[in-house]
Image (tube, rainbow, N blue to C red):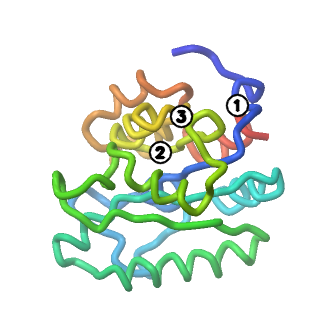
């Protein structure tokens, strides 16, 4: 993997973040963040997002939410969690510019990462966004593959090894950079 400095990502204007495992603690495989009381913001995530906001970059969440298709929660539940997250971030002077989520099960759509439908939705609302001026930060192989499919660089968040999905070694090798947390990624590469 090439060594990167913040200069390598100097032209980034759009920062696409996965949610679970990047902004909030990922639950064990098979469990889902179905409500705000199950949403635990990771240390430093608020400050990382605030730094991105202050830099003038757009911060966009793109998240697979398969639990909707499985009947564990609804689209309204996801929107409620995102509204609560915005209120929480506001206390730190931070905000997310937009949220996009895939409610489908595997192989049912063109928006579930690693496909790029969520990014295409975002480009409709952010017409200046492209693979060349965006970065994707995620904690799973599907995030890093989505970055490649979108033509954008990526940062793999290593996070807690106990909750990493299968494919994390491959994701680590495909990513343009790796970091233990969103805060460290932003501080090292995007400040």
Mark 2 is surrounded, within 10 Å at the Cα level, by few (under 14), some (14 to 19) or many (20 or more) other residues, namely many
Residue drawn at (33%, 45%) of the image: 115
Front: mark 3 or 1: 3
Of the numbered discs 1 and 2, the one sitting upstream in the chain is: 1
Q: Which residue is mark 1?
A: 9
Mark 3 neighbour density, 10 Å: few (under 14) some (14–19) many (20 or more): many
Residue picked out by circle 3: 152
Compared to residue 146, the image places residue 17 above or below, namely: below
Instruction: Using the rendered view, name the quadrant where residue 42 is placed.
Output: bottom right
Whole-angstrom CA distance, mark 2 to mark 3, is: 12 Å
Helix, strand or loop status at disc 1? helix
Residue drawn at (69%, 69%) of the image: 95
Based on the displayed image, in which of its 4 quarters is residue 27 positioned?
bottom left
| Nearer to the camera, 107 or 182 | 107
Quadrant for the C terminus, please.
Answer: top right
**Position of residue 167 in the picture relative to residue 150 (left or right):** left
Judge the density around disc 1: few (<14), some (14-19), many (≥20) Cα neighbours within 10 Å. some
Q: Earlier in the sequence, mark 2 or mark 3?
A: 2
CA distance separating discs 1 and 2: 16 Å
Horizontal side of residue 116 vs 126, given as left or right: left
Q: Position of residue 56 (x, y in %)?
A: 80, 53
Query: Mark 3: which secondary structure?
Result: loop
Which tag, 3 or 1, sits closer to the chain's start? 1
Point out residue 62 in the picture as x, y percentages from the top left corner. Answer: 46, 57
Q: How many marks?
A: 3
Identify the residue at horizontal 74%, vertical 52% (top origin).
57
Q: Nearer the viewer, residue 122 or 142?
A: 122
Element under disc 2: strand
Q: Report the residue marked by disc 2.
A: 138
Residue at the limit of the structure toward the top, as seen here: 2
């Amino acid at each position: 993997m090439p060594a990167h400095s913040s200069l390598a990502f100097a032209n980034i204007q759009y920062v696409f973040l996965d949610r679970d495992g990047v902004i909030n603690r990922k639950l064990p495989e098979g469990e889902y963040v179905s409500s705000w009381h199950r949403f635990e913001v990771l240390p430093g995530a608020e400050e990382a997002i605030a730094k991105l906001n202050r830099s003038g970059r757009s911060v966009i969440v793109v998240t697979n939410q398969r639990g909707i298709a499985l009947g564990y929660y609804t689209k309204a539940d996801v929107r409620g969690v995102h509204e609560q997250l915005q209120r929480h971030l506001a206390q730190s002077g931070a905000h997310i510019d937009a949220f996009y989520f895939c409610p489908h099960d595997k192989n049912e759509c063109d928006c579930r990462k690693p496909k790029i439908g969520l990014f295409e939705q975002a480009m409709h609302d952010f017409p200046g966004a492209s693979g060349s001026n965006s970065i994707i930060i995620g904690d799973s192989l599907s995030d890093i593959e989505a970055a490649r499919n979108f033509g954008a660089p990526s940062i793999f968040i290593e996070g807690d090894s106990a909750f990493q999905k299968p494919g994390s070694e491959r994701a680590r090798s495909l990513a343009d950079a790796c970091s233990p947390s969103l805060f460290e990624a932003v501080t090292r590469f995007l400040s």
